[in-house]
Image (tube, helix red, strand yellow):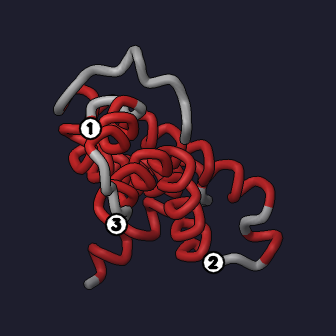
Amino acid sequence: MPYDRSWMGFGIIGALESGGIALLVGIVVYALLHALVGKSGGWSDGKELSIAFVLAVLIGGGQDMWDLLYFTMAPLQSLTLLQLKLAAVHDPDAIGLRVFFDIVGALIGACLGWAMFSSGGMKRLLAGLRSS
């Protein structure tokens, strides 16, 4: 998500903040999916979780993922162009760490949303674990 990151920290602190944002986005996206489409649309829990996860990753960490992909794939043929692109990215040294925490935060957020908003989701999971 292209938002102002000037307030974010650098290194592991910035990555944890970015992952926390993705976690909150995952909870909100799952709650919205569950309320709007969810069971009334005939969706299973797995479909709700997977779509909430993908949307949370795209919303919460899409800009970081795009920057990481751009720096790995795009041919940067001049030093001036590279400096220009790096100046536009907040903390380019820890971009891989931020992408990792974005993905983990979105996954945990979608799972927490399922546990909070699904009707008996966590109870069914624990009952299944106990019986096996």
* Label 2 or label 3, whichever comes before in sequence order: 2
Q: Position of residue 77 (x, y in %)?
A: 31, 56
| Amino acid type, callout 2 | Ser
Identify the residue position indicated by label 2 in the image: 44
For the point 34% across and 63% down, the residue is: 75
For the point 33% across and 55% down, the residue is: 76
Q: How far apart are the two marked residues, 3 and 1, measured between alpha carbons? A: 15 Å
Q: Nearer the viewer, mark 1 or mark 2?
A: 1
SS class of the residue under badge 1?
A: helix
Q: Position of residue 92 (x, y in %)?
A: 26, 38
Q: Are marks 1 and 2 in contact (CB under 8 Å)?
A: no
Q: Quadrant of the C terminus?
A: bottom left
| Amino acid type, callout 1 | Pro
7 sits left or right of 116 in the view: left
SS class of the residue under badge 3?
A: helix
SS class of the residue under badge 2?
A: loop
Identify the residue position indicated by label 3 in the image: 73
Q: Nearer the viewer, mark 2 or mark 3?
A: 3
Q: Are marks 3 and 1 in contact (CB under 8 Å)?
A: no
Above or below, comparing residue 45 to residue 72 in the picture: below
Identify the residue position indicated by label 1 in the image: 92
Q: How far apart are the two marked residues, 1 and 2, measured between alpha carbons? A: 39 Å
Above or below, comparing residue 61 to residue 87 in the picture: below
Specify the quadrant of the image occupied by residue 88.
Answer: top left
Residue 120 visible to an observer of this rendering: no
Mark 2, Cα crowd under 10 Å, few <14 / some 14-19 / many 20+, is few
Residue 3 visible to an observer of this rendering: yes
Q: Quadrant of the N terminus?
A: top right
Q: Position of residue 125 (x, y in %)?
A: 40, 69
For the point 82% across and 70% down, the residue is: 40
Q: How far apart are the two marked residues, 2 and 3, measured between alpha carbons? A: 37 Å
